[in-house]
Amino acid sequence: MVNIILILTFLILYVVGVTLAGAGGGGFLAALAKTSNDARECEELIKKENIPNVSLFSAQIDRHGPVISFS
């Protein structure tokens, strides 16, 4: 729970919304950044803080519908 609150304090200025999924020993926080620059800033902030048990994924939404890419 502490990690979620910490992550949200970093993201709040750069995202339009977040959602949590999962329960028990794992979970998933999805956040929608305001811009691609904001997404990069979020990634750098999380990496800089070295928060344990965090994996980052990126996705893009274009005019033609949802497109998800994993890197």
Image: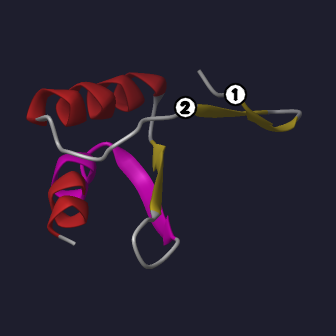
Task: From this view, report whether residue 2 is shown above or below residue 34.
Answer: below
Can you say which quadrant of the picture contains the N terminus?
Answer: bottom left
Dot 2 corresponds to which residue? 58
Q: Where residue 62 sits in the image (x, y, percent)?
A: 76, 31
Which one is in front, 54 or 17?
A: 54
Q: Which residues are magenta?
A: 8-21
Residue closest to the far bottom: 24
Q: Report the residue at 43% width, 65% height from top.
A: 26
Kindly identify which residue carries mark 1.
Answer: 69
> Is residue 28 covered in magenta?
no
Residue displayed at 24% across by 58% down:
8
Quarter of the figure with the C terminus: top right
Find the distance from the CA under tag 1 to the CA under tag 2: 7 Å
Residue 55: quadrant of the picture: top left
Label 2: how many Cα within 10 Å (few below 14, some 14–19, many 20+): some
Labels 1 and 2: the sequence-earlier one: 2
On screen, residue 24 versus residue 63, left or right, reads left
Q: Nearer the viewer, residue 39 or 53?
A: 53
Q: On screen, 36 above or below 57?
A: above
Give the tally of numbered discs.
2
Left or right of 21? Residue 40 is left
Give the x, y percent position of residue 22: 52, 72
Q: What amino acid is labelled 1 in the image?
A: Ser
